[in-house]
Image (cartoon, rainbow, N blue to C red):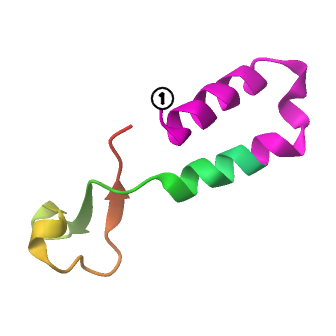
Amino acid sequence: MTDRQLMQWALYALEGSNAYDWPVVEDLKERLAQERKPVAWRKHYENSGYTYFDERWGTIPDGAEPLFSD
């Protein structure tokens, strides 16, 4: 089990208990957000709709929205 998976399970357990207002819940959410790496990005263009990008493009345009796998 990866650290990310362990933290995700801990967060699920805390959210389902009375401990939801503990500061550790917010800390877990922040750490999980830091460990997430986008798998692709998308940017909306008025004339053509969404265009999708990944690291093969070399450069991700400013304002592109990150997309995650989980």
Rendered residue at 35%/48% (across/down): 68
Q: Which residue is mark 1?
A: 1
Task: Describe the element under mark 1 as helix, strand or loop.
Answer: loop
Query: Where's residue 28, x and y in %?
Result: 70, 45
**Amino acid type shown at disc 1:** Met
User: In the displayed structure, does residue 18 sit left or right of residue 60?
Assistant: right
Residue 49: quadrant of the picture: bottom left
Query: Where's residue 11, x and y in %?
Result: 68, 31
Rendered residue at 45%/52% (across/down): 36
Rendered residue at 75%/50% (across/down): 27
User: In the displayed structure, does residue 31 sit left or right of residue 68?
Assistant: right
- Against 4, residue 30 (above or below) is below
Residue 25: quadrant of the picture: top right
Seen as rendered, the residue at the extreme front is 1
Query: Where's residue 20, x and y in %?
Result: 84, 30
Query: Where's residue 47, x and y in %?
Result: 11, 70
Q: Which residues are magenta?
A: 1-26
Label 1 packing within 10 angstroms: few (<14), some (14-19), many (20+)? few
Residue 57: quadrant of the picture: bottom left
Q: Quadrant of the C terminus?
A: top left
